[in-house]
Image (cartoon, rainbow, N blue to C red):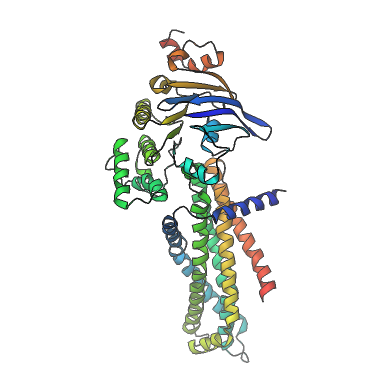
Amino acid sequence: MGVFYHFGKYLILLRNSIRRPERTKMYVKRLFREMNEVGVKSLGIVALIAVFLGMVTTLQTAYQLIVAWIPVTVIGEIVTETSILELSPTITCLVLAGRVGSAMASELGTMRVKEQIDALEVMGVNPASYLVFPKILATVIVIPMLVVIAMALMISSGAFIGNNSGIVPINDFLQGAQSIFKEKVFIFSLQKAYTYAFVISSISCYQGYYTQGGATGVGKASTRAVVWSCVIILFADYILAQLLL
Amino acid sequence: MIELKNLQKSFGDLSILKGVDAVFETGKVNMIIGASGSGKTVTIKCMVGLIEPSAGDVLYDGRSVLELGLRDKKKLRQEIGMLFQSAALFDSMTVEENVAFPLRMFTKQPESEVLDRVNFCLKRVGLENRNKLMPSEISGGMQKRVGIARAISMDIKYLFCDEPNSGLDPKTALKIDHLIEEITDEFNITTVVNTHDMNSVFEVGDKVVFLYNGKKLWEGTPDDILNTEVEELKDLIFASRFIRRAYGV
């Protein structure tokens, strides 16, 4: 019963958020602000994680695979395939669920408890479309870009550390990477990124928008946003792999 | 003029408003008073459309909110200004952006006219040259004044104030009360103030409606209120030792 109630409420929020805006210019301004919040401000953490994941994946793959009869190009193949297919979209989005999701839920939650959402409603502004839609759209535009950046950084950092530690020369690494690269896999990874971006933003906005009960409520909404986003991302990861691969 | 006709609101089995009838006249500061939990906030939220009443109607100059279509409702909302208990300023915007928000959202005025209107409203509430400050950089009383400036930035006909004095010292509270009274006279609007501050009632109230357990138990002027025979209202008025001593009760 509780699950259906929340799912119904979530769908109503999504429906209300796609209603025609009162003044498009104001919404566009808000969209750019959200793209900056979600994208530019997440770049640092995404880059940091991608670089370290790329390096660790290379070292661990080499540790498991270095035997005389396996060509070293295989390390490049594995690191590239793993980075594109799983690590970049899933790990990046799990991290962003923590950073972006909690920020969205706490911003909307604070607006709710401080009556700012009520103020918008009294003015005649549709708060769902003014507050929620730009967040969802910005996230769906920006997160796939972050995922592509993460892919590039993971592969390059993997190649760099492989070369510097003497495990695999950079040319062999890149040869492996080029030989394994498939457009289909890249597109699948982007499909994952779009799905996760929608999951993170819509769930976090839902949790924040319906916050109840002051500062404690904001904290709870923020926690629920992160937990549910992560759970749904992992679930969607499995479903997408089953359906699309 | 705003009329409430048999306004009722229940949350599940819990009945909050049990049929409230009242008339709030134009150009007057109408006070809704009552103890905490008496239904004041629910009444005001039903009036501005934040809560759907379970039964009854609200009429704005004869226009029933039940009969208004979506477009007319939106139009009506642009005639309504509201000062919230917490001022409800948008944290991410400056004072100027907060006041300009309704103008930028609903009018097609050029930016220069928007800024002129913002400056006029801020000057009217005594906050000229504070345009670029963030809400977190100004005091609670100033935030309330910015809230009033935002409410009057559009050509409103109705002003609602939910506990405008909460969290303010008596002197600042008095300033806010007088500002509300002056704006009501100057713009000839219908003002409804929700309060349990008896100082406000005696200072600026033109008409008082007393709610008790979701029912209207009394209405009249602040001058009549001291002679009331309604025990529940007496309990509210003379709750403080200071007022009992002042009026020799």
Residue A61 seen in render: no
- Name the outermost residue toward the left: B129
Which residue reaches farthest top? B248
Is residue B213 visible in the rendered image? The answer is yes
Residue displayed at 54% across by 31% down? B43
Residue B17 shown left or right of residue B181 in the figure: right
Image side of residue B12 versus residue A23, left or right:
right
**Residue ranking furthest to the right:** A1
Tell which of B16 and A235 is nearer to you: B16
Q: Is residue B5 above or below residue B245?
A: below
How many numbered badges does the structure rendering display? 0
Q: Position of residue B106 (x, y in %)?
A: 42, 48
Q: Residue at x 60, y 80 (%)?
A: A184
Q: Is residue A68 above or below residue B65?
A: below
The answer to which of A83 and B173 lies nearer the viewer is: B173
x and y, in percent, of residue A2 in the image: 70, 48
Q: Nearer the viewer, residue B88 or B107?
A: B107
* Percent position of residue A226, x then y: 57, 56
- Residue A203 sits above or below residue B234 on the image: below
Q: Residue at x 53, y 41 (%)?
A: A214
Q: Quadrant of the C terminus of chain A?
A: bottom right
Res A238 → quadrant: bottom right
**Along the line of sight, the residue nearer the viewer: B88 or A128:** A128
Percent across and percent down for residue A212 are 57, 42
